[in-house]
Image: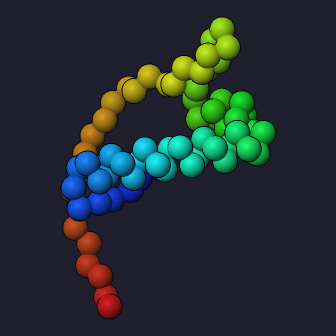
Amino acid sequence: MSTSGKSYSEVKKRFSELVEIFLEEIIKSGDINAVLSNLGWEKIKKQWMPPAMISQKIEDFEMALKI
């Protein structure tokens, strides 16, 4: 998931809203177990545990746009 905003706090707020909507939708659809399992989450003693982050890297790139 990703989002954007004019400030860090706006991005945090939008991302939080995005996650909330995502979770509401998969709960409503009844697919929460399948979706979280496919995303690498594990259910341990009735609690979902997220996958461990192995690495993170930010890269810049340039691209030309023809408008």
Coloring basis for residues? rainbow
Q: Residue furthest top?
A: 45
The residue lying at 23 percent from left, 50 percent from top is: 8
Vertical relation: 61 (above or below) 55:
below
The number of discs equals 0
Place of residue 30 in the rendered image (x, y in percent of width and height, measured from the top left): 78, 39
Q: In this image, 55 relative to 20: left or right?
A: left
Pick whichever, 35 or 54, lies toward us.
35
The residue lying at 43 percent from left, 44 percent from top is: 16
Vertical relation: 6 (above or below) 53:
below
Vertical relation: 64 (above or below) 3:
below
Q: Residue furthest bottom?
A: 67
The residue lying at 61 percent from left, 16 percent from top is: 47
Place of residue 23 in the rendered image (x, y in percent of width and height, measured from the top left): 60, 41
Vertical relation: 67 (above or below) 52:
below
Using the rendered view, name the quadrant where residue 33 is placed.
top right
Pick whichever, 50 or 14, lies toward us.
14
Pick whichever, 20 or 62, lies toward us.
20
Quadrant including the C terminus:
bottom left
The residue lying at 31 percent from left, 35 percent from top is: 56
